[in-house]
Image: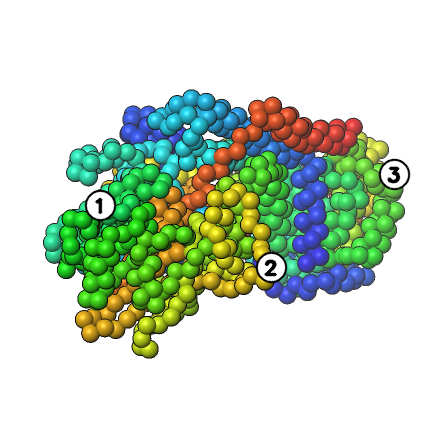
Amino acid sequence: MIRFLALVRKELLVLFASPLAYIVLALVVLVAGLLFFDHLRAYNQILFLFQTSTMGGFESGTIPDHVNLRETVFFPVMENLGFILIGLIPMITMRVFAEERSRGTDEILLTTRLSPGQIVAGKFLVTYGFVVLAMLASFVYPAMAILQGGIGVQHLSSVFFGLSLLAISLASIGLVCSAFTSSQFMAVVASWALCFVLWDWSWLTPFLRDAESLARFVDAISIHPRYSVFAEGVVRLEDLIYFLGVCLVSYALARFALDWRRVAG
Amino acid sequence: MTEPKGQEAGSPAPVQGGGARVEARGLTRRFGPLVAVDDLSLTIAPGEALGLLGANGAGKTTFIRLVTGVLLPSGGDVLVDGHSPVRAPAEVCKRLGFVAETSRIYPDLRVRSFLRFAGGARDLAGAELERAVDATIERFHLEEVAKRWVGQLSKGYQQRVSLAQGFLHDPPLMIVDEPTSGLDPLQQEEVRAVLRELRGERTLILCTHDLSEARDLTERAAVLHRGRLVAHGPTSEVLGGADSLALFRGEAE
Amino acid sequence: MNRAVALIGLIALAFGGASLAGSGEATWFSWLNLVAGGACLLGSAGVGVVRARGASAPAFRAPLLRAAGRLALALLLAVGAERGAASLGVQFDWSFEGKFQPAEATLAALADLCEKGELEGRLYYDEGDARRRSTRVLMETLAHGNCLGFEERRIEDYPEDEDRFGLGTSNTVVFVLRDERGETWESVERPTQGALFEALFRLRQLRSGRVYVARGAGEGDFSGLGPTGFSGLAAALQTEGYEVGEFVSAAAPEIPDDANLLVWVNPERRLSDEALGALRRYLERGGRLVALLEPGSDTGLEEILAEWGIQPLGGAVVDPASGSFESVARGLAPLAYTYAKSHPVSRGLDTNRMTFFRGVRSFALRKPQVDDRLHTVVFASPRAWIAEDEAVLRHTTAPVEPPEVRHDYWPLVVAGQYEREAGEVRIVAFGDSELASNQYLRALYNIDLVMNAVHWAGEQHPLITLRPKEGVAGRLQFPLALQNTLTMYQSLGLLLPEILLLAGALLWARSRA
């Protein structure tokens, strides 16, 4: 435990010593803010139009049900933010393993009393912590506005839960890419491509009309539909386990990368 | 999280005055068609300082990686105090202080934080850790730079930090890989002075291609050429001959 | 080199997939990318395997096998746990309206249809319709643990279905039932759970009985679409399998024999003697009556109810436990949350499932015969009292409580059951009629109370249930002044990232100084 804590401490220091952490954090907050306020502005305009003129068969002064803060602002913002995370999160994860390898510091790590499992777990844990922090920061404005309007803490926490789990699994994919290479460039490009490829497979289903079980499988491994369910305010055990499974498999893959290095050099 | 067997949490490595015994038997390592270490058998007695010599690419670093367990051997075996780095990595790491080549260090950490991490990763904690860090800083004359970022230091200082890291837990086996490469002569002398101090207390494997360094710091020497052990004996004998450079070319015996 | 090839393959695959997903068509660009990407990945995997074999020494086998075993174990564990959890179907509905909680009524309808035949639910959508995911979750929730098969179909891929089901818009659900009668289907264009429930109910093609609605003395209008009309109740009756007919006393001397039930909603004028006589005779024959009254009315209906032991009281119930509502002062529009525990009419209703009364009178109960059963189904809160003059309902200020007034659980809805020689008589009397009007029928659990009263009186006990509720929080519209938005954005949306960037720059500069 002492070793593990020492590693976590070191990872935190290294992470926050790099300007990249602040840049990514600032970008996440900035993008979330931009998205949110842009949608809010559009929403205000629509509201104004509905109140002052006859639109879409609604009498002036009546606002249709689907024009509301939740569906016009909050959900689209969360949807877009989720996708933008694909771009931002690999920028944090790319250096975690690859930098150690390119600097050769991984040999120092491996010759201390830290086991490979501890090394991987420590790095995963710190990255997860950072990613959740970033989500927390990006969640501030939407949450404030929505709480004011009364969306309900439970629903809000379900969305945040989903967003964090999404960020964590994207980070896991990025970490695996970082563990298999010593080049940060390779790591970041591979994670972008992989996250993008795993994001949503639902487009494939029309092509799989005759292979139902394959279509179901393809649907089950996509990340985005799982996130959507949380955004709707439904917490399903299977989605929770799916995200935990992504973490577990990523952990095992990263460990495998370390083991493989002992063989391949 | 899986921990290797036989690792006792919380107990720092015991100090063994005599140092550790390292024994390689038929040690072989291939990378595809390339044989980096070829059927190497070598015994290093406790307390002995061994200079591992050879040209670049002779297999010195591979040998060290096999001893530290960073690489798995393709064949043969290496034992540290009877423990194999493959089967009991924890036992080996407990006895091991490893100093890699220059610049293999975290530039984003302050010297003190880095040493604290190095100690923590070897199960030192609390007052014990602080004592060890203080003692090491004093011993390696790092007081002036203790609060600075490692990346800001000169190469000589960086190498001292690297040595300090490997020495922090007072290991019975110290492996030092090319400690003076890339340093100017003054810095080289600084580092050698530190190593001279450490000599004799523990087993030391010094990997170098600098013959004077080996003469200066070690009592026995082993010369590698293309992964094979071409000479092994007291340093003065191995390097005493007139054409010691021929050794590097693999022309001995 | 090998990894670079794998990377190129991954990038090509990503772009090929994105092109395919974006256009929905397999173009040369997507094919080229997909094929090239797949080939690169396969090739690099092949090279990797060959290399791994080259690197294989007997000494590596055990550690590599261990590592691979760990990997396989993790994969197996993850997939197994996910599949296991999916089959358990545990889920928590944290949505604001609880819209994914399957209602008892919906589940019952599904179970009934499953017994009849094979049921399939299809969601038709256009690409990019965001509403689809909500419908998908709802359908998956409904499909769990019963026979309903759920499938999503892009409309343009199924032109034959478009004609057959008359699909007009994306996000349409079609239920298809195959049973001995052949194939029947129902389509729902705005698939909320309520709409889905109604479609399922229509598929059941139940014949629950014939309801007559009394007309002729200014009663509630079952064809009125406005907020004060009762067209919603008429639709609900039809949805749940009743045929609705009208009884006009001036046109027919007797209530028809095929009536399973008579509904009498708040006559404005005093009823004619003929009408009252017809009702008396109908009840004595073993009739069933659901009567919805209003405070202060005196139409003759009250006298007949009194004959059956249900004496409507004068004045109006004031329940200070209920706050003010819209323009109604505090206490005049009671929210009821106390129900008879064991009566079928109030089955499933509890303190969390309230009903809303817009001005209500109470009743006093006295059994005409020993064996008769008279129950209060809905009570006011224990703080309620009765204002002598129902005119307080028109005031905009809360009525002042007179001294020494009686506080009690005043009855708001009562039900009576009478064994007579001609048959069993059942009467349900409501102290308010507006709770069933279009304006308030869908508020809280009003529709359940009214419809369950109808089912009980008509002896359709299996239909007594709780129906799915539509969202009320969908209307979450608050305008923020544009200036406020801007101020908020400048102070928060930009300041926080700027501080973060400055902190990073400062730290970086210090470490490189």
Q: Are marks 3 and 2 on the same chain?
A: no
Gap in Å between the C-alphas at discs 3 and 2? 88 Å
Secondary structure of the residue carrying tag 3 is helix
Q: Residue at x 31, y 67 (%)?
A: C308
Q: Residue at x 87, y 47 (%)?
A: B139
Q: Are marks 1 and 2 on the same chain?
A: yes
- The reply to whether discs 1 and 3 touch (Cβ–Cβ < 8 Å) is no
The answer to whether residue C105 of the structure is visible from this angle is no
Gap in Å between the C-alphas at discs 1 and 2? 59 Å
Location of mark 3 (residue): B144
Q: Where residue A149 appears, x then y in whole percent?
A: 55, 39
- A247 to B86, vertically: above or below: above
Q: Residue at x 49, y 55 (%)?
A: C388
Gap in Å between the C-alphas at discs 1 and 3? 83 Å
Which mark, residue C186? 1
> Mark 2 is on which residue type?
Pro
Q: Where residue C313 appears, x then y in whole percent?
A: 42, 60
Q: Chain of mark 2?
A: C
Pointer 1 or 2: first along the chain = 1
Location of mark 2 (residue): C403
Secondary structure of the residue carrying tag 2 is loop
> Mark 1 is on which residue type?
Glu
Q: Where residue A104 appears, x then y in whole percent?
A: 64, 41
Tell whether B67 sits left or right of C285: right
